[in-house]
Amino acid sequence: MALTGMQIYKDLPRTNCKECGFPTCMAFAMQVAAGQKALTDCPEISSDAMSNLSEASAPPMKLVKIGTGDTAFELGQETVLFRHDEKFHRPCGLAIRIPASLSDDEASSKIEAVNALNFQRVGATLEPKLCAVEIEGSFDAAARAKLVAEKSNKAIILMGSDAAKMEAAAEAIKDKAPLLYSADASNIDAFAKIAASTKVPLAVTGANLEELAELIEKAKKAGAENLLLGFKNDKIGDSVRMLTRVRRAALKHKFRPLGYPTILDIQASDVEEETVMSAISAAKYAGIVIIDSIEPWSMLPILTIVQDVFTDPQVPNTVEAKLYEINDPDKNSPVMFTSNFSLTYFSVAGEVERSKVPTYICVVDTEGLGVLNAWAGDKITAEKIVATMKDQGVADKVDHRKLIIPGLLPMFRAEIEDISEWKEVIIGPETAKEIPVFLTSL
Ligand code: SF4
């Protein structure tokens, strides 16, 4: 939250000594508030004032980075409780647990399966971003951490409660900046010391929010800077309640001890329950959820919800309005048009691809609206469709003049035939899933 000039002025020496290059402390304060000058440009400022002002002007929720390079995962620095107020900035990350009960070979197989998991949806690649390896039991902690670091292409979470084992694991792969999950009242001093010395992020859990806030302060005093608030729950209602209280405390009440991103270890009784709990928690307000399953049917709905919730509601999700060639079309291939709303386009393109029928898709700029909304909002007209097809040179691509129009827009048929060279307008299916049957029966 940015400070006002007056708030900054109150903490300045107020001697108007001019050493900062400004005639008064107030003039300097206004420049700092506007981001034009730094507090350090005042040589007279006290260390207490500097620390107060730096703290007060920090974002209400800290940004934390786990991992390094291409596999780094960032979370936090969220600014709103409700997506429609602005947007949610950093999508919730899915972390897949590598249980301590697995042998090295079994752990390697699961890590490789996690590496290979990805889905293409509306032009984006959806995948789990983290690997959460349990550091418990009798195996060599450092060796298990190294195995995961070597095999995984994800950011790494080290999960355990034994400080000695966690220290060995963290030291072994500290260059990968893994997250330590998690410290509690019984081991906070030891865990905070490990996090401070290895400079890795640390998740802290508490019996309740009051204890959690105290432990966070303790970890901070010990030098652990990159902190997460950890939760472990088997009841979705409790999880959402807790995550909402934390988010509200950080953003609405600027309660600094809870101004950190969150991580939730899902404790579900089966994969179906885990899927539902993960999806709900990802939407509100977990920064990371740790799950066991790598079943594609479980992962896709969770990742789909994350993708949907974390898109910017103020920016239309669009694809470029141009002529797309699917399945290598030629002069005799069918031509259809659709809107530039990405979900519409990718649904249509995906079904055309599935049909294996070579086809041209002319995408009309509807400002990110689906076809029916675009028609209702006057963003698509027969004239606009004809002009777009002309701009895209569609007539030069084919020898025929047949145009397939969406089944939801039959009203354009006569007008397009009247005003253009496309004299045979065919009304296509209303939904994308009907496209393969439609195209193959032409
Ligand atoms: S140097 Fe500091 S004390 Fe002096 S005028 Fe500037 S802001 Fe005020």
Image (tube, grey):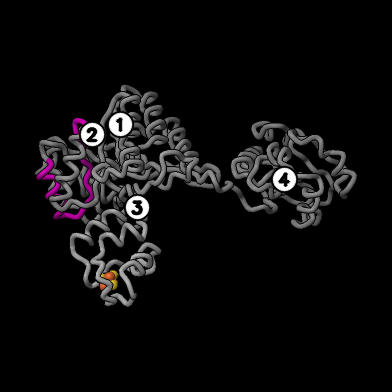
Q: Which of marks 4 and 1 is nearer the N terminus?
A: 1
Residue wearing tag 4 = 379
Judge depth for marks 4 and 2 and give the one in front. Answer: 2
| Of 376 and 197, the residue lying toward us | 376
Q: Can the viewer see residue 164?
A: yes
Q: What residue type is labelled 2?
A: Leu
Q: Which amino acid does label 4 sit on?
A: Lys
Q: In the displayed image of the protein, which residue is found farthest to the right?
A: 418
Q: Which amino acid does label 3 sit on?
A: Thr
| Of 149 and 163, the residue lying toward us | 163
Q: Neighbour class for label 2 at 10 Å: few (<14), some, many (≥20)?
A: some
Magenta range is 188-209
Identify which residue is drawn at 86% across, 42% down. 415
> Which quarter shows the C terminus?
top right
Identify which residue is drawn at 76% across, 57% down. 391
Residue wearing tag 2 = 209
Q: Give yes or no for contact between labels 2 and 1 (Cβ–Cβ under 8 Å).
A: yes
Quadrant assignment for ligand 1:
bottom left
Marks 2 and 3 sit apart, C-alpha to C-alpha, by 31 Å
Q: Earlier in the sequence, mark 3 or mark 4?
A: 3
Q: Can the viewer see residue 41?
A: no
Q: Does the residue labelled 4 lie within 8 Å of ligand 1?
A: no
Residue wearing tag 1 = 242
- Is residue 397 shown in magenta? no
Q: What residue type is labelled 1?
A: Met
Residue wearing tag 3 = 71
Judge depth for marks 3 and 4 and give the one in front. Answer: 4
Disc 4 secondary structure class:
loop
Residue 204 placed where, x, y %? 21, 40
